[in-house]
Structures are given as C-alpha cells and as structure tokens.
Image (cartoon, rainbow, N blue to C red):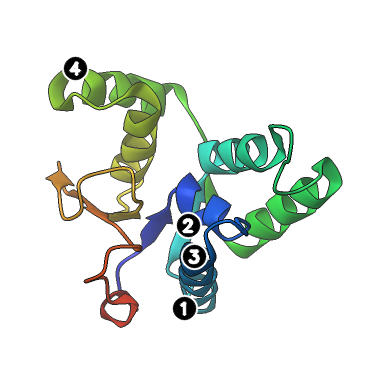
Amino acid sequence: MTEILIDTNVLVYAHDLAEPEKRKQALRVIFELQQSRLGCLSVQCISEFFNTVTRGKSPMLDIQEAIEQAHVLINSFPVFPLTPMVATNAMKGVKEHSLAFYDAQIWACAHLNQIPVIFSEDFSDGQTLEGVRFVNPFAEIFDLEKWL
C-alpha cells in the first residue's frame, strides 16, 4: 500500500460549505485515508489549514473550532515536520521544477520522507517529480479505491 500526503486544499474543502461536492469528496478521502492508515500530513498543511479556515469576513470555522479540527488531524495522521532539509529541498524544487515555494515545500516533505503520492488539486494531475506523483482527488476520473 502507498502512503499519501494530504495537501491543505483537501483539508480545507472538508469544511467548505460553498463547495458541497468537493466537501463530500474531501471528507470521504480524509476518512478513508485515516481508516486505512495510508494518509499523512506536513505540519505546513496543518498551519495552512488553520490560516485558511479562520480568515476573512466569513471564516469557515471560528478559531476554537479550527483549533479543535487541527488537533483531530494531528491525532489522526502522522505529521511530518518542516526542517532545514525540507526548506533546502523546496528551494531546489523552485529552481529545478519551477514550483511555487510553498508548493515546493509540500513536495520536498513528501520526497524526503519517501511518500510517493500527494493528493492535491494544486499540481498537474498525474505529474511525477523525482518519484513523487501528484493526484487530484477532485478530478472526474479519480478513483479512491485504486489508492486504498
């Protein structure tokens, strides 16, 4: 079975009432990856999740709810830290693969921790960079059963 890093957008859509189809899919993906013990996170994803769901005039979650949900995620999945090596490899990802820095940090975290798949809508679906494959769990052709 393949370990899968869950990107921030999947975590956020699980709370996005404005996107009911993506919300349903995100909840399913998160649940199945937790149940199968195949999912993992970067501490960056937890931080970005909290920031995204609590900002703006009409935040998706109030601060206390976001804290609680962040703790649920932290307790449900292995969480990989941001390290100097992750930052250094992210810089390489920017230079060699033209990734935006924070996307490169997600890629570097997966790459250095030998996580071969990232579920995210922020990358080209099916693209592989140095052994890390990007899969869009919101694509019409996505089949979660293939990954479990």
Q: Disc 3 vs disc 4: which is toward the camera?
A: 3
Q: Considering only order in the chain, which callout, 4 or 3, is on the residue closer to the N terminus? A: 3
Q: Which residue lies furthest to the right in this view?
A: 64
Look at the numbered disc 4 and give the secondary structure of its residue.
Answer: helix
Residue drawn at x 66%, y 43% is: 53
Q: Kindly identify the amino acid type of the residue bearing the numbered disc 2.
A: Cys
- Residue identifier under label 4: 95
Which sits in the foreground, 146 or 82?
A: 146
- Residue identifier under label 1: 36
Residue drawn at x 31%, y 39% is: 107
Q: Considering only order in the chain, which callout, 3 or 1, is on the residue closer to the N terminus? A: 3
Disc sitting over residue 10 in the figure: none
Residue drawn at x 35%, y 62% is: 138
Estimate the x, y position of residue 42 in percent, counting from the top left. 49, 43
Q: Considering only order in the chain, which callout, 2 or 3, is on the residue closer to the N terminus? A: 3
Q: Considering only order in the chain, which callout, 1 or 4, is on the residue closer to the N terminus? A: 1
Q: Kindly identify the amino acid type of the residue bearing the numbered disc 1.
A: Ser
Q: Disc 3 vs disc 2: which is toward the camera?
A: 3
- Residue identifier under label 2: 40
